[in-house]
Amino acid sequence: MVEKKNEVLEWVKALGFALLILFIVRTFLITPIVVEGASMNTTLHDQDRMVVTKFGEPERFDIVVFHANAEQDYIKRVIGLPGDRIEYKDDTLFINGKAYNEPFLDKQKENIKGDLTKSFKLENTAVGQSTVPEGHLFLMGDNRRNSTDSREIGAIPIDEVVGTTKVVYFPFKDIRIIED
């Protein structure tokens, strides 16, 4: 009888330890997310399931998940870092006056007529100033014609960023690592 109690106690300890490790990993290291909507097409698709890593600072062109409001998280691409001047002119991204190539948009541009990204200057967006504020990011969806992003909602505080994501793990036929 004592031997059975010890065995049960060992199983309870092992299960408790496993749950503690799961809690720590999910809270501080990685978490799953589901892409909702078309704002990141053609890079990501509605209902793609991804892994979000919660460590490290986001870098330019990383895909990030952030708290858009109390109920929703959004997934977008980092375009501008604190202090950057952002402008789109003739469907070309300029950061601090330098033109940048965005190869992740090439597939999308093949399938449209006209500009994918309409021309704008940062100060004419919801950010309302000429540079990305300190402690904030300027984020855009890859589906530039159909994305609610920093152009409409303003610069996103870095502390609202949940983490970065590059790994699609479902649907199984679409498992991949997203390259910048």
Image: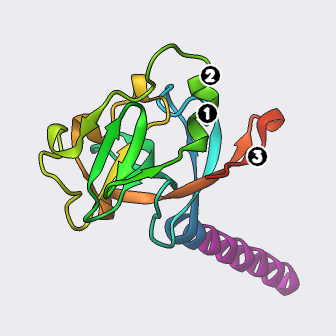
- List the residue tagged with mark 2: 110
Residues in magenta? Answer: 1-22
Circle 2 crowding by C-alpha within 10 Å: few under 14, some 14–19, many from 20: few
Numbered circles on residues, count: 3
Which quadrant of the rendered structure holds the N terminus?
bottom right
Residue drawn at x 56%, y 29% as measured from the top left: 41
Q: CA distance from mark 1 to mark 2?
A: 6 Å
Q: Amino acid at mark 2?
A: Glu
Question: Do residues under tags 1 and 2 come within 8 Å of each other at their CB atoms?
Answer: yes
7 within the magenta span: yes
Q: Which mark is residue 54?
A: none
Q: SS of the residue at dot 1?
A: helix
Res. 18 visible in picture: yes
Q: Mark 2 and mark 3: span between their CA atoms?
A: 22 Å
Does 157 sit above or below residue 56?
Answer: above
Residue bearing mark 1: 106
Q: Position of residue 168 (x, y in %)?
A: 69, 45
Give coordinates of residue 157: x percent, y percent: 26, 59
Three-letter code for the amino acid on which mark 1 is drawn: Asp
The CA distance from mark 1 to mark 3 is: 18 Å
Q: Earlier in the sequence, mark 2 or mark 3?
A: 2
Residue lying at 64% horizontally and 35% vertically, measured from the top left: 48
Question: Is disc 3 surrounded by few (<14), some (14 to 19) or many (20+) residues within 10 Å?
Answer: some
Per the image, is 71 magenta? Answer: no
Q: Secondary structure at mark 2?
A: helix
Q: x%, y% of residue 61?
A: 50, 54
